[in-house]
C-alpha cells in the first residue's frame, strides 16, 4: 500500500476551522486507499507565544527547558488533528517525536536527527490509516525532548519520507517555487520542477520556501518533495533530481534581497593580518557578512562586502577602530543597495550565462557594484531603485 | 538530606509573575539545605482552554488524544518554573510524568497511578536540588500519556511523598481546612489538624480543599499533608493520623451545600420493583441523587431524596412517567433546600452528638426535613433561609 508523508505548516493549522478542513481533505486521501503520515507544526504563532513567556522570565532560558516548553506547541496540534480525524471515523493516532521513534543528537534547540526507528512506524501503519507526527521534535539519549531548530518540521517530514516513502508533500501558504518573487515581478512563473541543488542555492540566497537543510536531506536520501498551497488545487513545484531531464534551462530563477549595505575598502596592506583583522572586528560585533569580493594589486588589497542594513551601527564601530589602526585606508559605503541573484543548475554546463547577464545590465544601463559567483549562481549588488527593471530584464532574457 | 514534596495549584502559577515569586520562595527553601520535589498544575485556566479547543471539534473527543492534549498544560508550567529557578542559579530540572517514573493504569482521562519508579527520582535528587514534576499525568503500558482525572495533581504530589518523604505541602488559594465555610460563617476557625477520615468525609460532603482520592492515598501510605495558602505566612492545616491525639473533639466541621432539591414520595407499593423503578428512571436521565432516606409502614414505602436544583427538568420528566405508572403516589417537592452536614471523627465514640444536634435545631426553631447519617457525619436538609442561623448555632454548641 502506498504511503505518503504530508506536512502542514503553522499558518495552515492556526485555527480549529483549518484543522477541520485539513481533516476533511485527509479523509478523501485515505478513501483512495493511501496510508498517510502527517507532520504538523504548532498552531499559528504558538511557538512565538511560548518563547515570549520564557523571555519574560530571563533573556537566556536554559535550553533543555526551552525545548520542553516549545515542544508542547506541536503536541497540541497532533492531538487536535487526531481528535478531528477520529471524529470522522478515520483510524488515526498522534505520535510525539519520541513515540514516532525520532532519535536526535547535538545541542538543545538546534538538534539533528540521528536515526528514525522505522519499525515503530511500520507497526503503527498496520493499525492506523493516518499517523500524525509532531514536527520539529525528537528525543535524545538522555530521554529529553529536543527541537530541531529553524525549518524543523520540514526536516521531520523529509526524514520520515526518507525511511517510509521517498515522497513528501509540503503544504504551506505559497503555491510552490517561483522564478522570482511574485511581489516584485508580478508575472513570475511557478516552476514545475526544480533540482535539489538549485533549491539549496535559492534557499541560501533568501528564498523562504524551504530551509536548506531539509532540501539537503532530501537530496541525500533521494526524497521527491512537492511544495504547494494548503487545500488548493493550484498545483505546485516538485523538488527532485532533475539531472535526467531531457532539456535544461540555464537559468531557473532570480531572487532579490533588499536593504543591503555595501562596503568597499581600498589601500589595505597586503599582509595576512590585514583582511583577517577586519573580519575579526566585524565578527566580534556579530555583523553578518554575506558577499565578499577581494582583489589585490601592487601590495594593496581592494575589498568589498555586504551586510544587512540594520547592522550599520555595529559596522561603523568596527570601521572606526579599523581607521584608527590603518589610517591609510579609504572606505566607501552604499546603504541603498540590493542583492540580485540568478540561479540555474544549467549554468554548470552552459557557457555564456555570465556574459549574457553582464550584457543585460549594460543594455538596461543598470550599474552593478559587487559580483560573486558560485557553481550554479551569480549574485550582483545593484541600487535598490533598479531592482524591478533588472528582474524584468533578466526574466525576459532567460524566458522565466 | 530532607526531601519535601510541594504542590502548587493552577491559580498559584497562573502568571509569569507568580512563577517568579514561587521561584524566589523555593530558592529560600533550598538555601536551608532542603531537597524539593515540586508538583505543578497547568497555568490558570489552561486546561479549560485546551478542553474547549477539543470540544469545538467534537463533543466526544477520543480520550487517548484528549489526554495528550491536556498534558501539555502541565508540561508548559514545569519548563517555565525550571527556567525561572535555573535563572536564579538553583539547580533544577523539569520532569514529565513519564520522566518522573509515574506509571499509570486504567482508562484515559481517569487513570490511576500504578507505581512510581523511585530510583529515577533518587538519581535526579543526587544531581539537582529541585525536581519539578508535571502533575496530573503519567505514562501507561502502551507508552501513552494518561491523565489522572479530578484532583490529579494533588494525587501526584501525595504519591511522590509516599515514596520519597512521607510529607507533602499543598499550596492553594485557601489557607487550610476550616470548621465551616468562612463565606457563610465569618468566624469559622481554621483547623490545625484534621484526621484522614474526617477530611475524606468533608471532601465527600462538598469541601473543595482536596479530592477524596488524594486523602485516601495519603492515609494508605501515612503521608502527612499540610494545606496552606500559596506564599502566605498565615499557616494552614495538617491532614494526618490524629488517633494518637490526647483529646478529640466530637465535631470538627460543618459543611453546607446549597441549591438542593428535596423530593418526598409517599404511597409507593412496598415491592422490590417499586423503589428500584424510581431510581432507574432517574439514572437513565443522569440525575445525581445524593441523600436517600426510606421508611416503610403497612405495605407502603415513604421515600425522600435530594438532587441538584439544576437537574429539576430531568427529575420532573422521570416523576411524570412514574405518576403515569403508579397513579396512587403523592409527591412533595422543595426547591429551596440546603444540605448541612456535621463531621467529626469523635462521633464514632462520643454518644449524644445526634441528640445535641436535634436539640440545637429545636431550640433555634429550625425545621429539618431529611436526615442521613454515616459513621462520622450527620446530614440534614433544611430551608436555605435557615442556613446561616443553623451554622452559627452548631458552631456555638460544639465550639467550632
Image: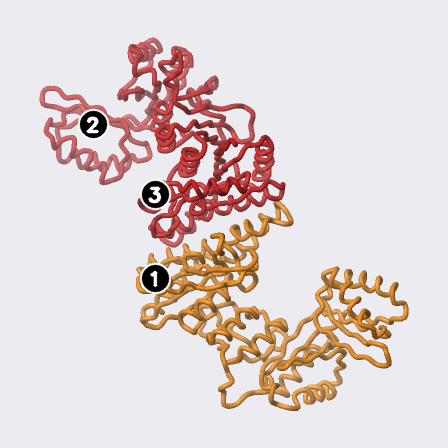
Chain colours: A orange, B red
| Chain at numbered mark 2 | B
Say which quadrant the N terminus of chain A sits in. bottom left
Q: Chain of mark 3?
A: B
Residue at 52% in and 35% down: B36
Q: CA distance from mark 1 to mark 3?
A: 23 Å
The residue lying at 33 percent from left, 24 percent from top is B339
Tell me if residue B161 comes above or below residue A204 in the rendering: above
- Tell me where residue B298 sits by quadrant: top left
Residue linked to disc 2 = B331
Q: Nearer the viewer, residue A370 or B1?
A: B1
Local crowd size for mark 2, using a 10 Å CA cut-off: few (<14), some (14–19), many (≥20): few
Q: Is circle 3 on the same chain as circle 2?
A: yes
Q: Which is more toward the observer, B51 or A204?
A: A204
Q: Is residue A145 left or right of residue A121?
A: right
Residue B55 appears in the picture as rendered: no
Residue B195 appearing in the image: yes
Position of B197 with respect to A342 (left or right) is: left
Closer to us: B198 or B222: B222
- Return the residue at label 1: A124
Amino acid at each position: 500500500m502506498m504511503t505518503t508523508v504530508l506536512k502542514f505548516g503553522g499558518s495552515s493549522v492556526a485555527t480549529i476551522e483549518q484543522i477541520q478542513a485539513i481533516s476533511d481533505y485527509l479523509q478523501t486521501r485515505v478513501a483512495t486507499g493511501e496510508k498517510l503520515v502527517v507532520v504538523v507544526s504548532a498552531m499559528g504563532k504558538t511557538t512565538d507565544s511560548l518563547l515570549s513567556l520564557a523571555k519574560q522570565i530571563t533573556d537566556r532560558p536554559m535550553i533543555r527547558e526551552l525545548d520542553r516548553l516549545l515542544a508542547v506547541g506541536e503536541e497540541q496540534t497532533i492531538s487536535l488533528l487526531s481528535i478531528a480525524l477520529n471524529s470522522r471515523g478515520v483510524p488515526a493516532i498522534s505520535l510525539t517525536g519520541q513515540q514516532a521513534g525520532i532519535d536526535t543528537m547535538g545541542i538543545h534547540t538546534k538538534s539533528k536527527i540521528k536515526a528514525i526507528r522505522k519499525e515503530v512506524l511500520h507497526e503503527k501503519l498496520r493499525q492506523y490509516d493516518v499517523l500524525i507526527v509532531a514536527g520539529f521534535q525528537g528525543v535524545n539519549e538522555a530521554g529529553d525532548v529536543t527541537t530541531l531548530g529553524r525549518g524543523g518540521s520540514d526536516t521531520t517530514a523529509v526524514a520520515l519520507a526518507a525511511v517510509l516513502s521517498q515522497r513528501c508533500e509540503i503544504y504551506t501558504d505559497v503555491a510552490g517555487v517561483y522564478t522570482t518573487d511574485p511581489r516584485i515581478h508580478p508575472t513570475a512563473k511557478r516552476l514545475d520542477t526544480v533540482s535539489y541543488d538549485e533549491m539549496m542555492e535559492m534557499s541560501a540566497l533568501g528564498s523562504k520556501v524551504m530551509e536548506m537543510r531539509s532540501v539537503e536531506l532530501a537530496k541525500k536520501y533521494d526524497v521527491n518533495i512537492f511544495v504547494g498551497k494548503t487545500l488548493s488545487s493550484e498545483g505546485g513545484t516538485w523538488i527532485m533530481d532533475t539531472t535526467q531531464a531531457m532539456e535544461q534551462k540555464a537559468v531557473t530563477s532570480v531572487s532579490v534581497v533588499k536593504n543591503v549595505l555595501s562596503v568597499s575598502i581600498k589601500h589595505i596592506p597586503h599582509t595576512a593580518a590585514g583582511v583577517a583583522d577586519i573580519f575579526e572586528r566585524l565578527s566580534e560585533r556579530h555583523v553578518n557578512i554575506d558577499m565578499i569580493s577581494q582583489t589585490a594589486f601592487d601590495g594593496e588589497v581592494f575589498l568589498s562586502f555586504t551586510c544587512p542594513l540594520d547592522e550599520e551601527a555595529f559596522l561603523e564601530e568596527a570601521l572606526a577602530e579599523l581607521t584608527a589602526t590603518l589610517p591609510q585606508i579609504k572606505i566607501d559605503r552604499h546603504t541603498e543597495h540590493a542583492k540580485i541573484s540568478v540561479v540555474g543548475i544549467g549554468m554548470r554546463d552552459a557557457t555564456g550565462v555570465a556574459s549574457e547577464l553582464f550584457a543585460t545590465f549594460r543594455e538596461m544601463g543598470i550599474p552593478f557594484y559587487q559580483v560573486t559567483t558560485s557553481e550554479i549562481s551569480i549574485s550582483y549588488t545593484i541600487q535598490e531603485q533598479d531592482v524591478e527593471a533588472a528582474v524584468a530584464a533578466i526574466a525576459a532574457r532567460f524566458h522565466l
